[in-house]
Image: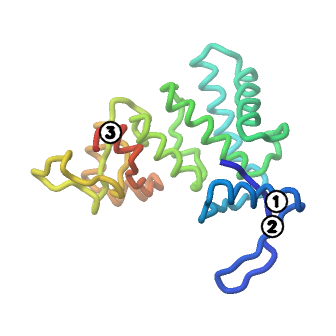
Amino acid sequence: MKEFQAYPIKKDGRDIIFRFKDEEIANKFLSTFQLFNQTLVEIQVRDDREISAKQRRFIYAMFNDIAKWSGDAPEYIKQWFKLAYEYWQELDTISLRDVEKSVAAGLITFILDFVADHNVPLSFKPLDALEPEDVAHFEYACLMNKCCVICGKKPSDLHHLDGSRVGMGSDRRDVNHLGRKAVQLCREHHQMFHTDENKFMSKFHLNGIQINEEIAKKHNLI
């Protein structure tokens, strides 16, 4: 996926005109659009506010926990993740003192993916430390890595949310799970959710994730 920066300059009903930084970038965008015969462009709005104190504390807490897990120094972990993320996103050197909030959110999801992939034990509950806009990615990562969205424990199960549940007596293999909403829960929190799902969804600021083919395949639902 290629990324191009442009600025909205005019709105007319549902039509919005964007201006690119210069003509060369506009030409690259147009050639890419035509090359792949695209009919739809995904637009992401960047948040230029500075990193929040909550985001910064969360990032450093993960650095410390990854350091304990790996045996490396926290400063080494910090530099490794910064360099890896800068390289992946083709960014200039970023500073965790004043980086844009949207970049900080991207770094958080990058680190969370590593934590989930390698089952790194965390000393805190991510849901207590995440900004609201970062929670959805964590929910998705937990479904993909089969770890409880509340406490991070394994083993855990995919929990269909109210309105998306599979009926009693139904063969899960015969049900179309795509589009149904779910969260990943360990046995303890699974039982807790069955007592009052709405209460705990609200308490932990969860929205649930719609099951796509990737999640369905991971959980042998298709």
Q: Amino acid at mark 1?
A: Asn
Question: In the image, is 170 to the left or to the right of 219?
Answer: left
Toward the left, the furthest residue is 169
Residue under label 3, please give it: 219
SS state under label 2: strand
Q: Residue at x 71, y 36 (%)?
A: 88
Q: Residue at x 39, y 35 (%)?
A: 146
Question: In the image, is 104 to the left or to the right of 182?
Answer: right
Residue 159 drawn at (x, y percent): 30, 47
- Which one is earlier in the sequence, the residue at label 2 or at label 3? 2
SS state under label 1: helix
Q: Amino acid at mark 2?
A: Tyr
Q: Residue at x 80, y 41 (%)?
A: 91
Q: Amino acid at mark 3?
A: His
SS state under label 3: loop
In the image, residue 164 above or below residue 126: below
Residue under label 1, please give it: 27
Display colour scheme: rainbow
Question: In the image, is 57 to the left or to the right of 94?
Answer: left
Residue 138 drawn at (x, y percent): 51, 44
Q: Are marks 2 and 3 in contact (CB under 8 Å)?
A: no
Residue under label 2, please give it: 7
